[in-house]
Image: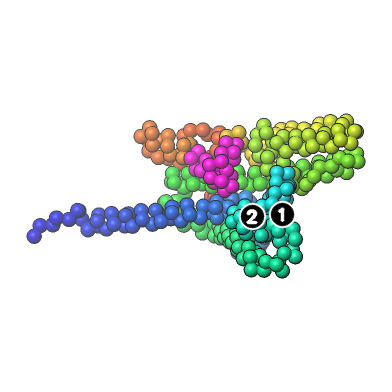
């Protein structure tokens, strides 16, 4: 009987394996999509703290211990600070927008409850003695609200814990992952390695540089607002100085805008206070001049170019930071810069040679001054290997 197969057994086996790999890739993509918040937050934590981890690793020869210290002293405080800022900002916005609302108390949003339960809980909060008259209805409402709060808090804690764990794993195992990738693609002298090395270095430059820049600008803004409260005439004060300082630091990431989106409303609020008090307008003008110098000119002219470097144009990254949350939600602030870097390095390294039909190389064919030069990364890695062998 003649062979009516689809080719030699070896070829059929390879087709079967590729089909299996494709299924695995689709499954991995589905998992990444399902847990994208954990993934991008963990990747951000890794790249934002990797330079600190490597600095500590020169003094402590235990990867797991160094990774744990890095996460505890950098990632956890950042998340606690973000939670603190978000909670206080929520309170202020709630008081300003819905201070007299009957559907919100403190951090609790009761608008999703049925009207009967919402009215019962509102009455209970305003008059706790009603619990004696309506114990069953009050208990049902309390259990419903408590379940919603516990569910939201538990989900957030799980997401944060898993993100921190992912950052810890990447810090501890990045050398092994890098070595495995080099063996997979055939060594350092390959296009795939050059591309991934450029993406890896760009992401570290973006996340660590920007984290450091935000920290520096937040500290400067905190000093400026603290000095304002210390020197201001009676009746003038900057509210939530620490919260506004952190928001100023984050806003400073956006070129041209920098701290204006925060310190100008602060100055307007101080001016309103001065008009009500009947004095202090010259002080407000002086505060505006100081804010302009410290929170506008200083970051754009000196701090940002020195800290973040010139590997990536911050004006281009601005679109990623602004459009990311608009497209994807809060995690888009981390996701879209990652996607931007992945696309940028693909445009610089493999795509020009693919379009021209030329052999793939490890060199940059387009935009040499925009991102990382893979050759410089390869030289650093070779130097590290030589130092390790010695």
Visual colour scheme: rainbow
Per the model, the C-alpha gap separating discs 2 and 1 is 10 Å
Q: Nearer the viewer, residue 260 or 19?
A: 260
Does the magenta portion include 331? yes
Can residue 104 be seen in this snapshot?
yes
Residue at the far left: name it: 1
Work out whether 234 lies above or below 34: above
x, y percent for residue 202? 56, 43
From the viewer's perspective, is 54 left or right of 178?
right
Q: Quadrant of residue 131?
A: bottom right
Q: Nearer the viewer, residue 213 or 89?
A: 89
Point 73% across, 44% down: residue: 96
Point 27% across, 58% down: residue: 13
Point 50% across, 38% down: residue: 344
The residues colored magenta run 317-344
Tag on residue 110? 2
The dominant secondary structure in magenta is helix
């Amino acid at each position: 009987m003649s062979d009516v197969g689809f080719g030699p057994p070896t070829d059929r086996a390879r087709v079967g394996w590729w089909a299996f790999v494709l299924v695995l890739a689709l499954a991995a993509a589905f998992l990444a999509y399902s847990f994208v918040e954990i993934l991008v937050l963990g990747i951000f934590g890794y790249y934002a703290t990797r330079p600190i981890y490597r600095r500590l690793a020169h003094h402590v020869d235990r990867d797991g211990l160094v990774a744990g210290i890095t996460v505890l002293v950098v990632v956890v405080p950042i998340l606690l600070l973000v939670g603190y800022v978000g909670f206080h900002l929520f309170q202020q916005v709630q008081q300003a927008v819905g201070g007299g609302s009957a559907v919100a108390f403190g951090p609790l949003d009761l608008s999703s409850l049925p009207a009967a339960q919402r009215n019962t809980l509102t009455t209970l909060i305003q008059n706790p003695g009603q619990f004696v008259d309506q114990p069953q209805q009050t208990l049902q409402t309390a259990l419903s609200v408590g379940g919603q709060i516990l569910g939201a808090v538990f989900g957030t804690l799980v997401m944060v814990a898993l993100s921190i764990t992912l950052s810890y794993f990447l810090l501890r195992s990045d050398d092994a992952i890098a070595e495995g990738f080099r063996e997979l693609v055939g060594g350092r002298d390959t296009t795939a390695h050059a591309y991934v090395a450029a993406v890896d270095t760009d992401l570290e430059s973006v996340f660590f540089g920007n984290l450091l820049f935000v920290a520096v600008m937040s500290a400067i803004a905190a000093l400026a607002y603290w000095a304002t409260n210390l020197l201001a005439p009676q009746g003038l004060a900057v509210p939530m100085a620490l919260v506004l300082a952190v928001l100023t630091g984050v806003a400073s990431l956006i070129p041209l805008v920098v701290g204006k989106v925060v310190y100008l409303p602060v100055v307007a609020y101080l001016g309103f206070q001065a008009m009500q008090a009947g004095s202090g307008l010259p002080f407000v003008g002086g505060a505006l001049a100081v804010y302009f110098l410290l929170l506008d000119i200083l970051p754009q002219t000196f701090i940002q170019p020195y800290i973040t470097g010139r590997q990536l144009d911050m004006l281009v990254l601005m679109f990623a930071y602004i459009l990311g949350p608009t497209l994807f939600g809060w995690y888009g602030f981390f996701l879209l810069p990652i996607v931007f870097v992945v696309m940028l390095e693909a445009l610089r390294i493999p795509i020009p040679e693919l379009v021209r039909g030329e052999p793939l190389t490890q060199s940059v064919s387009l935009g040499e001054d925009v991102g990382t030069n893979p050759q410089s990364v390869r030289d650093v890695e070779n130097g590290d290997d030589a130092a390790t062998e010695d």
